[in-house]
Amino acid sequence: MSKKNQNKTYSFFSSIEKNFDKAAKFFSPEEKGILEQIKACNSVYRMHFPVKIGKEIKVIEAYRVQHSHHKLPCKGGIRYSIKVNQDEIMTLAALMTYKCAIVDVPFGGAKGGIKMDPQTISVENIEKITRRYTSELIKKNFIGPGIDVPAPDYGTGEREMSWIFDTFLSLSPGEVDALACVTGKPISQGGVRGRKEATGLGVFYGIRELCRIKEDMLSIGLDVGLVGKKVIIQGLGNVGYHAATSFHEAGAIIIALAEREGAIYNQNGLNVYNVVLHLKNTGSILNFPGSKNIENTEKALELECDILIPAALENVIHKNNANRIKAKIIGEAANGPITPEADEILEKMGVIVVPDIYLNAGGVTVSYFEWLKNLSHVRYGRMEKRFSENMNAELVKVIETICRKKILKEEKKIILRGAREIDLVRSGLEDTMISGFHKIRELKNSTGIKDMRTAAFVFAINKIIDSYEKLGIFP
Ligand code: GLU
């Protein structure tokens, strides 16, 4: 078989099985049965449906996979890409199960996909396909606030989620919780503030936490903190963009940005906001003033840097390029960007890999907040914001009287402020990412597991086993 064909038949699902099996070694032989159950995909719905595009009838191939029902509803995004296939969607659904367990979000993992390139299809037709896909899910009971709750993923966003919600609502009249059938919706359609940037911001919080630990930084020869650290980001989509701006704001230097058409490099740092403006104006990141073009975009991954963030697609770091990676830290913002073979090479090279099943869980964490908001039918902060502000004002008055001193106007503004929805969402996300990081790190250090991925898997599997045990298995 030629090398090209070998790559074609590479199974993404078997790569996650390999990661799972590595972690399974840390469990007792009696747990074999339950481990097999956790590993398997519970339900795979593969569908074909016709859509009339112009005068022609096109047959659309699509999927929804529910990997685990140990907690309900199932949860996970829907991607639109010409590369969508069953193996990929099964893998991504499995990753969702572990992700949710790590960040303590009470859902089973799921994923959906439609095989199409949205960039070559008109908005009207994308809408038609999205609505038809949703009705197929409804027919088979694969969507609903307590059943399975989709969200955005590669190639989808607020617009598609809004269509899904509208289709669901029109086919379930009177369903008072219909808003909770999908997350990642626009704010005006029941979305939550902070969902859009959640995955990228979560990536930032996770890496920032790692960089705060002196011992870990010393082990790879880096200083504590993010200021001055050289960062490369692959993918300037929703996740990559928000991760990039957060690193930039925190004082890290974004030395390279990579997109499909190529990469740009400037060792003194790229201003991400200006790069995005340039992208909007010219349709490409290439030829950004003051930067050097790198035509082969994959080469950007191999540049000298401290932190590498693959934020695009799976399998971009593989056995053929892993030994050329020079980053000390790799943060998996995308799902599955490193193959298991590459993982082994990187481990030997001493690179710290912060795994996807933890690092990009910020999206589903805030999706959980959105789902809760939809079920409670009230915006976060609505009941307590004014009350806290009034209480704070009273407190300030008492302090001023006791100290016989006036607090400055600007300081007062900060102290008095009650929490808005965005403040609560950000604080919930930050706390989730920080505590998730320490849970994995503690488990890793206390068991002697060498890499964060295996520790994260062990942590997640433990949690799912516990859930099955408490639940019992239906006879
Ligand atoms: N598609 C995102 C992910 O892979 C978000 C899933 C969700 O919010 O349900 O994590």
Image (spheres, grey):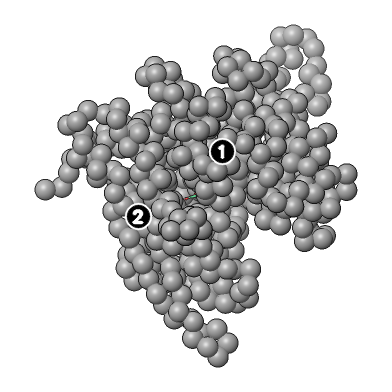
Q: Nearer the viewer, residue 162 or 295?
A: 295
Q: Position of residue 217 (x, y in %)?
A: 61, 19
Residue found at x 41% / y 53%: 11
Q: Residues within 10 Å of mark 1 (few under 14, many from 20)?
A: many
Q: Nearer the viewer, residue 301 or 153?
A: 301
Q: Element type at marker 1?
A: helix
Residue designated by label 1: 322
What separation in Å lies between label 2 and label 1 (alpha carbons)? 32 Å
* The N terminus lies in quadrant: bottom left
Q: Position of residue 175 (x, y in %)?
A: 39, 64
Q: Position of residue 79 (x, y in %)?
A: 51, 60
Residue found at x 56% / y 47%: 316
Q: Residues within 10 Å of mark 2 (few under 14, many from 20)?
A: many
Q: Nearer the viewer, residue 26 or 362?
A: 26
| Disc nearer the start of the sequence (2/1) | 2
Q: How many numbered marks does the figure carry?
A: 2
Disc number placed over residue 148 in the picture, else none: none
Q: Nearer the viewer, residue 45 or 390?
A: 45
Tell me where residue 395 sits by quadrant.
Answer: top right
- Mark 2 or mark 1, whichever is nearer to me: 1
Label 2 CB less than 8 angstroms from ligand 1: no
Residue 98 is left or right of residue 202, and the answer is left
Residue found at x 32% / y 68%: 140
Residue 83 is left or right of residue 67, and the answer is right
Residue furthest right as drawn: 290
- Tell me the kind of residue under disc 1: Ala
Residue designated by label 2: 66
Residue found at x 60% / y 55%: 187
Q: Element type at marker 2?
A: strand
